[in-house]
Image: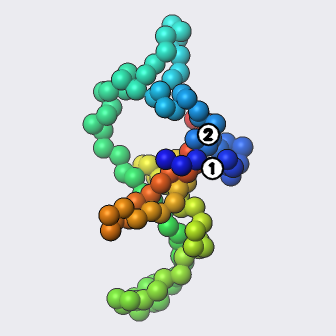
Amino acid sequence: MAATGEGIGSGDLTLDEMGSSARRGFQRDDENGQPKSAADLEAVFDVPVRVAAVLGQARMQVADLLKMASGTVLELDRKVGEAIDIYVNNRLVARGEVVLVDDRLGVTMTEIIKTDK
């Protein structure tokens, strides 16, 4: 994963700011002062989540939507090269860049979005 040095707001946490604790896994002391690790979360490893990488959005009338055919270009609200949003279960968790891996599209996360929940 690449990391950027700039965030988009006061609630953002870049991979640079996460530092070594991101590489070690989930590191938050429990009520007994014992450090937790990713292995402590093993019970939820098999829970399916929905991940969406949103390239952009567009608004249109239903009549225009019905006129679309194969090859129609849909203009989105983002510019080429602009970061895309990455959602997990409909919650914004990161921003990233589109990459090409062996003739398939992928996403490189460049910024983790920290929430106050």
The residue that disc 1 covers is 4
Calculate the distance from the C-alpha at mark 1 to the C-alpha at mark 2. 7 Å
Name the residue at 57% across, 73% down: 80
75 versus 54 height, above or below: below
Q: Furthest-left residue in view?
A: 46
Q: Which mark is residue 16?
A: 2
Q: Nearer the viewer, residue 83 or 101?
A: 101
59 versus 91 height, above or below: below
Helix, strand, or loop for circle 2? helix
Name the residue at 40% across, 52% down: 51
Q: Position of residue 111 (x, y in %)?
A: 58, 48
Is 35 on the left or on the right of 13, as rendered?
Answer: left
Could you tell which of marks 1 and 2 lies nearer the N-terminus? 1
Is 5 on the left or on the right of 75, as rendered?
Answer: right
Name the residue at 49% across, 15% down: 35
Q: Position of residue 45 (x, y in %)?
A: 31, 34
Helix, strand, or loop for circle 1? loop
Q: Position of residue 112 (x, y in %)?
A: 56, 45
Q: Furthest-right residue in view?
A: 10
Q: Nearer the viewer, residue 108 or 95?
A: 108
Q: Nearer the viewer, residue 44 or 103?
A: 103
23 versus 28 height, above or below: below
- Residue type at the position of mark 2: Asp
Q: Position of residue 40 (x, y in %)?
A: 38, 21
